[in-house]
Amino acid sequence: MTPRDNELGAFLRASRSRVEPGDAGLAGGVSGRRVRGLRREEVAVLAGVSADYYARLEQGRERNPSAQVIGALGHALRLGTQAREHLFRLAGLNPQLGPDSPRDLVHPSLLRLLESFAQAAAYVLGPSFDVLATNPIADALLSPFGTERNMPRVLFTDPRAKEVFPEWELLRRTTVYALRLNAGQFPDDSDVTGLVAELDEASPEFRVLWADHDVAGLTRLSKVFVHPEVGRIELTYQTFDVVDAPGQLLLVGTPEAGSRSEEALTYLASVAEPA
């Protein structure tokens, strides 16, 4: 069998050669190894398949792996989203893979910029207003909502929203109008359409606001938080479009200089762990 006849095996071999044993959680270094990267047996253990099965797959003697096996191999080999999609295609499979985490949707340079706002609350929103990435201060401000990071869902389904956001009704209205604007700009975005359908069923208040058909972008706005540790924080937000990712917004909230809000953010910055 020529290498061209076994593209899947060639890709697996190349991928395992790039993974250091320590990075995969395996003990031991590289001394005494005859091959670079992971051994076949180690990939098999990490993926939960037999060593013989993996060998046959790499050698091209097994031609019909399941999606579960390919998915496990992608994780074992620490492949990124695009590489995993390529792996599935080589195996004759074509699932719709999502990113490993919301942060994977954000360009690395934007993530670095996010972290540079040491005394501001900065985060990136997706078209459905999922919080895709935060800096430590923004993460601390949103901590009362646990792992939920979709802001419309928080505002319309989480009772804590009323406590954290004193201007709750105004914030809900502006969020819905901005979401409707995004729904028009990105009509094929399943996250937006799915969220609208979900909230239309779950919240009569959302249904009424959505029926207004008003639209307004998130440009410059003020927002008040009541944080359980530091109390009331007033921020003015600037919003920036992300050129490389249509629909994403970078929001940066800053307090008035010398205010109590500035002191509160300084405290949060001092205790927050990097996101």
Image (cartoon, rainbow, N blue to C red):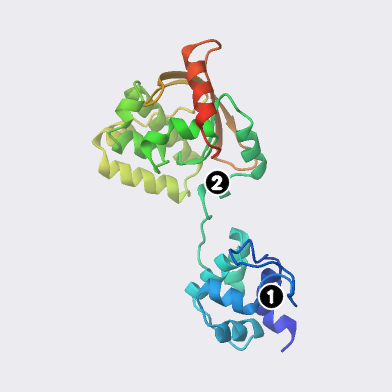
Horizontally, residue 241 falls left or right of residue 155, namely right
Q: Where is mark 1, residue-wise?
A: 13
- Residue 103's label in the rendered image is 2
Asked whether the viewer can see residue 93, the reply is no
- Viewer-closest of 250 and 57: 57
Residue at disc 1, secondary structure? helix
Sequence order check: which comes first, mark 1 or mark 2?
1
Amino acid type shown at disc 1? Arg
Q: Residue at x 30, y 32 (%)?
A: 160
**x, y (%) of residue 273?**
53, 36
Q: Amino acid at mark 2?
A: Arg
Q: Quick check: 172 above or below 124? A: above
Q: From this viewpoint, which residue is outermost toward the left?
A: 204
Q: Is residue 139 left or right of residue 54?
A: left
Mark 2 crowd level (few <14, some 14–19, many ≥20, 10 Å Cα): some
The residue depicted at 60 percent of the width and 79 percent of the height is: 41
x and y, in percent, of residue 172 in the image = 35, 29
Label annotation for residue 62:
none
